[in-house]
């Protein structure tokens, strides 16, 4: 029993402790996410990939049991000494250099008194076997090295998006947008924010990815902030609209259909429920955080600028931030959403057929670009339409490229840490240790289903166990295989707790970019939205438990090649 606990449960518990400790540290701002994410990835890799039992067996075999036990006690003593030195240094009872020197001297003394045992393993063949147990290549190459490059496409897109954003700002296009928006919106930021949320919802039913968020965010965020909407509220509006649209994006449905074999009708019903919850929560969030607040412009033009200077921007130049959106838009995806109304009438089918052909022509020959070429086209279009005969156009472009890359560098560094963490949680050796823990806490009745997964919803943050893009997909399959819950009920868990990941997770590239753009800490964005989304998740879980069968049907048990018990049939 003790050996089983050490080999099966202890690593998973240690990972859970590391996850909760780092999440608490980031949430309370005791440790920066820039450091916490790669540190969490490194610790996960050390806990999950190092073969401790095999390594201890080899050390005991070559050193002798007595020498090995003495080495373990010596190591424990050294850790106690180091902890004492750190405590003294933190309380300024001794200098940091003195603490480091003391730790090194203690380590040297322990190496000397354990010399007889250590010399027995000082051969290349024995050391090679021991180092193989440490999985150094996995930790260094797969987790840290490859992980740092895992999101390279995302942060490259962010750099080009930053370049266009700075150029649009320097050429006074952003200010022109804001002036027009202020004139059209009047004095009602609540209505503007709700409209912007619905615009995001409609756009992201077909768009996706960081590039699209950058394109739309550089237009919508300045408009909202110029009307006195707080930056964190403006960021929340985009996130809620984005996730509502993503819920109705057919590309996201395929994951549940392929992994859990859930019918399309059930997925669409769950998606409609989530859309209503997102938009309803968004309206409540906007009203509570905007209505009756004192107006203050968070994004505006300088007071010294004159109306005459503003009119110098050619109206065609206002298309600059919209050009990339048009070029990346895949109209066929939008047309596919209309298939559910096909067959209603001959004329409606004829119109859909014409639009489908036009969409295919656009996607094949004109649009459906990748994000980076689309941003480059937007930069060139902006430069051409704002060209000044006597101006330093090339100098402004060069300045925008450098400052644009610099402006997203905090987001890039965070994405590097996110990539490391993603590679760590996806590694089979890491996910393997979490399975026994999860298997022991899966609820099997309606009220625990709602309460347990509702209370555990924050575990979707920081690529945690309920994050479908972290450990979540493996966990979803584990819950489905090891519990009486139906495929639709399992889908209900992850489509609702996914709101915590989609809206609040500080490791999302879109959260990082939005926080960077509005010049706020990404953790503040999480705190602003957390309570709203958490309440929404409880409501969502209740609705999912009512709308879908909670337990597997006999056909599902048969599909798993496992006969249902009498209790399961009764459920």
Image: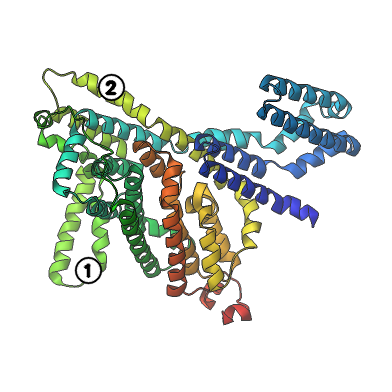
Tell me which label, 1 or 2, sits earlier in the chain.
Answer: 1
User: Would you say residue 128 is visible in this rendering?
Assistant: no
Of 549 and 128, the residue lying toward us: 549
Q: Which residue does the image show at 87% across and 30% down from the upper left?
A: 117
x and y percentages locating residue 390 in the rendered image: 12, 17
x and y percentages locating residue 257 in the rendered image: 43, 62
User: Would you say residue 453 is visible in this rendering?
Assistant: yes
Q: Badge 1: few (under 14), some or many (20 or more) residues near its Cα, within 10 Å?
A: few
Q: Which labelled disc corresponds to residue 521? A: none
Q: Which residue is mark 2?
A: 399
x and y percentages locating residue 163 in the rendered image: 29, 30
Q: Is residue 97 depicted above or below 504 in this figure?
A: above
Specify the quadrant of the image occupied by residue 223: top left
Q: Which quadrant is home to the C terminus?
A: bottom right
Q: Which residue does the image show at 62% across and 81% down from the upper left?
A: 566
Could you say whether the residue bearing mark 1 is in a helix, strand or loop?
A: loop
x and y percentages locating residue 475 in the rendered image: 55, 57
Q: Which residue is mark 1?
A: 342
- Residue 416 placement, left or right of 127: left
Question: What colour scheme governs how the chains and residues are painted in the rendered image of this protein?
Answer: rainbow
Of 268 and 556, the residue lying toward us: 268
Could you say whether the residue bearing mark 2 is in a helix, strand or loop?
A: helix
Q: Which residue does the image show at 82% across and 37% down from the upper left?
A: 72
- Residue 307 placement, left or right of 502: left
Q: Is residue 356 depicted above or below 233 in this figure?
A: below
């Amino acid at each position: 029993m003790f050996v089983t606990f050490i080999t099966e449960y202890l690593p998973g518990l240690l990972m859970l402790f590391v996850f909760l400790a780092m999440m608490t540290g980031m949430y309370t701002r005791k440790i920066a996410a820039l450091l916490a994410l790669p540190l969490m990835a490194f610790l996960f890799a050390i806990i999950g990939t190092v073969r401790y039992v095999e390594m201890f067996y080899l050390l005991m075999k070559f050193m002798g049991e007595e020498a090995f036990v003495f080495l373990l006690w010596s190591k424990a003593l050294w850790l106690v000494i180091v902890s004492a030195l750190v405590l003294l240094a933190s309380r300024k009872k001794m200098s940091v250099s003195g603490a480091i020197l003391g730790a090194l001297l203690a380590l040297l003394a322990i190496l000397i008194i354990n010399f007889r045992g250590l010399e027995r393993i000082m051969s290349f063949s024995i050391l090679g076997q021991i180092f193989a147990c440490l999985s150094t290549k996995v930790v260094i190459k797969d987790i840290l090295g490859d992980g740092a490059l895992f999101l390279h496409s995302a942060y490259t897109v962010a750099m080009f998006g930053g370049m266009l954003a700075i150029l649009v700002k320097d050429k006074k296009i952003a200010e022109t947008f804001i002036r027009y928006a202020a004139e059209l919106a009047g004095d009602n930021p609540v209505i503007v924010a709700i409209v912007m949320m619905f615009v995001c919802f409609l756009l992201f039913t077909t768009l996706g990815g960081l590039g699209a968020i950058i394109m739309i965010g550089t237009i919508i965020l300045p408009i909202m902030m110029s009307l006195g909407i707080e930056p964190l509220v403006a960021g929340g509006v985009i996130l809620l609209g984005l996730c509502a649209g993503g819920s109705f994006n057919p590309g996201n449905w395929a994951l549940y259909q392929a992994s859990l074999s859930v019918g399309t009708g059930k997925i669409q019903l769950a998606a409609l429920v989530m859309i209503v919850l997102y938009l309803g929560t968004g309206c409540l969030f906007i009203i509570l955080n905007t209505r009756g607040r004192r107006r203050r412009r968070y994004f505006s033009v300088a007071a010294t600028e004159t109306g005459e200077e503003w009119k110098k921007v050619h109206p065609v130049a206002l298309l600059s931030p919209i050009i990339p959106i048009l070029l990346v838009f895949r109209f066929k995806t939008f047309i596919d959403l209309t298939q559910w109304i096909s067959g209603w009438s001959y004329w409606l089918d004829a119109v859909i057929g014409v639009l489908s052909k036009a969409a295919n022509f656009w996607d094949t020959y004109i649009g459906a670009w990748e994000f980076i070429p689309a941003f480059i086209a937007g930069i060139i279009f902006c430069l051409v339409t704002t060209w000044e005969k006597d101006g330093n156009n090339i100098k402004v472009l060069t300045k925008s490229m450098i400052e644009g890359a610099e402006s997203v560098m905090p987001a890039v560094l965070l994405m590097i840490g996110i990539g490391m963490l993603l590679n760590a949680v996806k590694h089979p050796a890491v996910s393997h240790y979490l399975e026994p823990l999860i298997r022991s806490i899966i609820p099997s009745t309606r009220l625990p289903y709602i309460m347990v997964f509702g209370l555990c919803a924050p575990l979707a943050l920081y690529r945690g166990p309920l994050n479908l893009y972290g450990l979540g997909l493996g966990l979803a399959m584990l819950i489905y295989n090891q519990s009486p819950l139906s495929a639709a009920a399992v889908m209900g868990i992850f489509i609702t707790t996914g709101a915590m990941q989609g809206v609040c997770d500080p490791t999302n590239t879109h959260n990082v970019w939005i926080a960077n753009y509005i010049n706020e800490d990404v953790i503040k964005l999480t705190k602003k939205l957390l309570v709203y989304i958490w309440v929404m998740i409880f409501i969502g879980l209740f609705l999912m438990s009512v709308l879908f069968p909670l337990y597997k049907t006999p056909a599902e048990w048969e599909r798993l090649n496992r006969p249902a018990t009498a209790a399961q049939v009764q459920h």
